Amino acid sequence: MIKVTIDGHELEVENGTTILNAARSLGGDSVPPAMCYYSKLEGSGGKCRCCLVKVAAGSAKDPRPMPKLVASCVTQCQDGMIVESKNSQEVLDTRKAIVEFLLLNHPLDCPICDQAGECHLQDLGFEHGKAGTRYQEGRRVFNKIDIGPYIKLHMTRCILCYRCTMVADQLTPERVHGVMWRGEVSEISTYVHKAIENDFSGNMIDVCPVGALTDNTFRFKSRVWFLKPFNAHRSCTKCSGNVVAWKHGNEIYRITGRKDKYGEVEEFICNDCRFEHKNAADWTIEGPRLIDRHSVIGQNHFEAPYQDLLAKNLLK
Ligand code: SF4
Ligand code: FES
């Protein structure tokens, strides 16, 4: 075990733990936001830079500060390391700049996007972004395409986090899509528009932090905050069969994996469970799903703080 101090809190973690995971074990506002790291996907992280933190002392042996902010998801803790996350103005300013950068090409189409209400970029913008924009240039535009029967790719919204390609690499027997080209013209695409058809491809939808990959069987059926999530299970030969059934009255509108408080899927589920079993009779409902942070769940999350409303004379 080694000792690390994050925002003034000393904790012990196993040797080899990243700063982000150490912060997660501490919890609270010190946990850096993460748009590309996904604990269940090997090799994820290091792309979006949302999780940058300041290392004020590298280790007990060499207490010099690190010269630049570091990506906490791919930087391992050292014994005696001192890290500043929410306590560093430099980190907070940089997070604002990263949000601005991620939004350069992201359309502001939340009112018609299926991901609205459970979008990590919405949350990131609300929690860490600036209120205004300086951006005047045109954004990149792509046509929507169906990559296989179940998934719609809306590349315009993609932030190139690479999570979906890792799902394809690590969960399915063959990967037929990836990031094509480089720099500003990079895009997620299939090999000559080949269809993505494998049993676990639907998990790409769950790991996508924005609305770039959406469920063709659910698109535009309902805003997520009008649905009630329930833990449900069925006997399945391909996956655990443990899912969240999103119900409207007695009807199941969509099935997703169960996510933890960081929005990460606890167990990946198969396409059969996700897309082919929408009858209530197919599932044993366990009870209402408690979801901490995202989704409807985020209901009232975007409200202005009470004091702000008071100051603006919007409350009597
Ligand atoms: S489509 Fe979604 S999951 Fe894939 S790289 Fe883009 S943002 Fe990430
Ligand atoms: S979460 Fe660390 S770089 Fe994206």
Image (tube, helix red, strand yellow):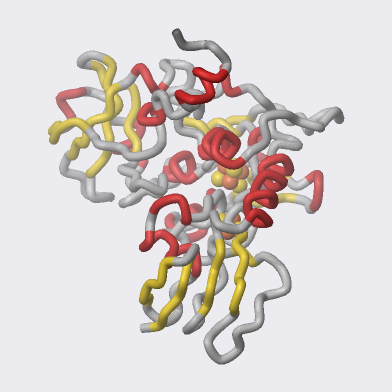
x then y, percent, for residue 200: 40, 47
The tally of labels here is 0
Position in image of residue 179 (x %, y %): 68, 51
| 295, 140: nearer the viewer | 295
Left or right of 15, for residue 109: right
Residue 188 seen in the figure: no
Q: Which quadrant holds residue 312?
A: top right
Q: Is residue 193 left or right of residue 60?
A: right
The answer to whether residue 262 of the structure is visible from this angle is: yes
Instruction: Name the side, left or right, on which 87 lies relative to 281.
Output: right
The location of residue 231, given as percent across then percent down, is 21, 36
Q: Residue at x 52, y 11 (%)?
A: 314
Say which residue appears at 41% left-offset and 45% top-offset. 263
Question: Looking at the image, is 75 positioned above or below residue 200?
Answer: below
Residue 167, image x and y in percent? 48, 53
Decide which of 23, 226 is in the foreground and name it. 23
Residue occupying the far bottom of the picture: 61
Residue at 41% over, 80% down: 3
Residue closer to the observer: 167 or 33: 33
Name, please, the residue furthest toward the right: 137
Name the foreground residue: 19 vs 241. Answer: 19
Which residue shows up at 49% across the image and 82% down it?
Answer: 80
Q: Is residue 133 above or below residue 266?
A: above
Quadrant of the image for the N terminus?
Answer: bottom left
* Quadrant field for ligand 1: top right
Location of the C terminus by quadrant is top left
Q: Is residue 157 above or below residue 98?
A: above
125 relative to 288 in the view: left or right: right
Q: Residue furthest top?
A: 316
